[in-house]
Image: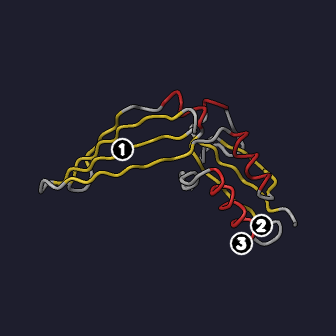
């Protein structure tokens, strides 16, 4: 949930889905919640900042269209003057890409939603998220 999928390469992401497939009982269900690439491309800021717990946080954000990845450089400046920098890379998926990966991993998609608040309602690029319920198929 909450975009915990997509931090690896495409091959590793598929391997992860296959591992999840093996971990589930037959007909077990997987819920996948990721950012919707089609929405993110319209709404993605280039810079974000906010006040954290004892620090200021700034993110410089770029979208790599060839790899379909959001590249984030996160700067933390603490009240005592310490600084930390983190690089974050997240693969964004369009709905057809996630469905394809799930199918390759042995799942059947049961439903696609664009929000937790509206199960079963998906509005393409207007939906911020992709919430997909998939069922494990028999081997």
Where is residue 34 shown, x and y percent of the image?
Answer: 59, 47
Mark before the other along the chain sequence, 3 or 2:
3
**Residue 28 got which mark?**
2
- Assign the N terminus to one quadrant of the image: bottom right
* Count of numbered labels shown in the rendering: 3
Q: Which residue is mark 1?
A: 73
Of marks 3 and 2, the one in the foreground: 3
- Residue at image position (71%, 72%) is 23
Where is residue 57 shown, x and y percent of the image?
Answer: 28, 46
- Residue at image position (70%, 46%) is 98
Label 2 crowd bin: few (<14), some (14–19), many (20+), radius 10 Å: some
**Snapshot quadrant of residue 66:** top right
From the viewer's perspective, is residue 99 above or below residue 15? above
Q: Nearer the viewer, residue 114 or 109?
A: 109
Of marks 1 and 2, the one in the foreground: 1
Element type where label 1 sits in the image: strand
**Residue 23 got which mark?**
3
| Disc 1/disc 3 C-alpha distance (Å) | 34 Å
């Amino acid at each position: 949930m909450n975009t915990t999928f997509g931090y690896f390469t495409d091959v590793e992401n598929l391997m992860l889905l296959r591992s999840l497939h093996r971990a589930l009982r037959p007909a077990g269900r997987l819920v996948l919640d990721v950012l919707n690439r089609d929405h993110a491309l319209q709404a993605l800021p280039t810079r974000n900042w906010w006040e954290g717990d004892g620090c200021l946080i700034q993110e410089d954000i770029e979208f790599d269209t060839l790899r379909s990845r959001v590249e984030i450089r996160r700067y933390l400046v603490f009240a005592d003057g310490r600084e930390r920098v983190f690089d974050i890379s997240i693969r964004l998926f369009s709905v057809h890409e996630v469905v394809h990966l799930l199918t390759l991993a042995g799942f059947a998609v049961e439903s696609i939603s664009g929000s937790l608040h509206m199960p079963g309602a998906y509005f393409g690029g207007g939906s911020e998220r992709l919430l997909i319920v998939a069922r494990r198929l028999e081997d």
